Amino acid sequence: MTKRQEEVLGFIEDFVKERSFAPILQEICDHFGFKSPNAASDHLKALAKKGYVAWSPNSPRSIQLLVRRAGRPGRTDMVTVPLLGRIAAGHPIFALENVEDHLELPRQLFRGRKLFALKVQGDSMTGAGIFEGDLAILAAQPDFENGQIAAVVVDEEATLKRLYRTSRGLRLKAENPAFPDRVVSSEAARSCRLAGILVGTIRRF
């Protein structure tokens, strides 16, 4: 986050704390002396992209804080998480591992080491409250416990499912009756790669 974005976010936080509602674009412009609403709009777009606020340009007072920071400006309560690409909650898709962006997330809400984020595509996990377009926050680790939701790479394709070890191999269970379970044989499971365990999701509106 740039220094100016930090200042704009701080102004929004203070405004909401004092008045119980968010400022409009013009109030941000007036506070910072921006000559054009486009300047405030650009900062809001950047903050929305980084997951701090939700905002609709077509609604005058639509700014919504998505993250309540315990302290600023040091943000020792925050953790920087790389956004790597897509993960299928449906039919598996190729696992994208290039870093697309970085997110600043509250440490108290997203526990774990080596956190990373993936965009969810598909609707096979709606029963677990995970929808297309959500950001899945995962902790990279080498193993899982039965019943945990995790990102697993099978034949270089990644998918988000609830995992179980069985006598037949690895069972990938969907949370949508329209999607059948997938069983990976014990032999094939040796080549599977556990990318990470789900620790939370972020939904953007």
Image: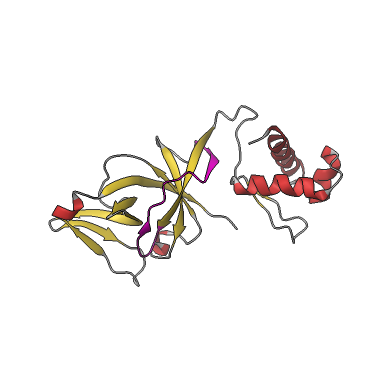
Give 71 or 92, whichever is nearer the viewer.
Answer: 92
- Residue at the spot x=71%, y=44% of the render? 43
> Does 165 sit above or below residue 107?
below
Q: Position of residue 35 (x, y in %)?
A: 87, 44
Residue 126 in which image quadrant: bottom left
Residue 75 in which image quadrant: top right
Residue numbers of the magenta segment = 88-109
Give 70 or 35, whichever is nearer the viewer.
Answer: 35
Give the mark count: 0
- Residue at the spot x=78%, y=57% of the render? 60
Give 122 or 144, whichever is nearer the viewer.
Answer: 122
- Residue at the spot x=35%, y=45% of the render? 196
Snapshot colouring: secondary structure
In screen coordinates, is 92 left or right of 23? left
- Residue 22 shows in this picture: no
Q: Position of residue 186 (x, y in %)?
A: 15, 54
Q: Position of residue 46 (x, y in %)?
A: 66, 45
- Residue 205 shows in this picture: yes
Please tell me whether residue 70 belongs to the stretch shown in magenta.
no
In screen coordinates, is 130 left or right of 54? left
In screen coordinates, is 63 left or right of 204? right
In screen coordinates, is 184 left or right of 41? left
- Residue at the spot x=77%, y=46% of the render? 40
Quarter of the figure that contains the C terminus:
bottom right
Q: Position of residue 102 (x, y in %)?
A: 53, 41
Furthest residue to the bottom? 178
Quarter of the figure that contains the N terminus:
top right
